[in-house]
Amino acid sequence: MNDDELDAVYTQLCTTLGAHGQARAPLILARLSLLLITRLDDAAAARLCIEAAAQGLAAPADAAARLGEQET
């Protein structure tokens, strides 16, 4: 996939998520993830992608604690 194709796919994803609303976005992303994992057909590569997607994200407890700190 070249840069233009990647941009077009990302734009379609954003447009689709926006059209279905914030409440349904997690369901769409979960279903998309499962469909892409199935297409990938490589467990090791899928595991690496999952790890890469989570890199740099705070754990839920850390994020909740930070929100509490911001409110005080």
Image (cartoon, grey):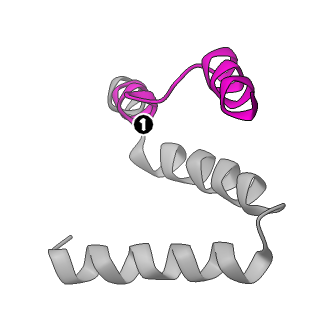
The residue sitting at 63% across, 24% down in the picture is: 66
Element at label 1: helix
Residue 65 image point, x, y percent: 69, 18
Residues 42 and 17: in front is 17
Q: Which residue is mark 1?
A: 53
Q: Is residue 69 above or below residue 10?
A: above
- Left or right, 30 with respect to 33, comes to right
Q: Residues within 10 Å of mark 1 (few under 14, many from 20)?
A: few
Residues 58 and 66: in front is 66
Magenta part, dominant SS: helix
Name the image quarter holding residue 55.
top left
Residues 28 and 67: in front is 67
The residue sitting at 72% across, 83% down in the picture is: 19
Label 1 sits on what residue type? Answer: Ala
The residue sitting at 26% across, 80% down in the picture is: 5
- The region drawn magenta spans 47-72
Residue 1 image point, x, y percent: 21, 70
The residue sitting at 35% across, 23% down in the picture is: 44
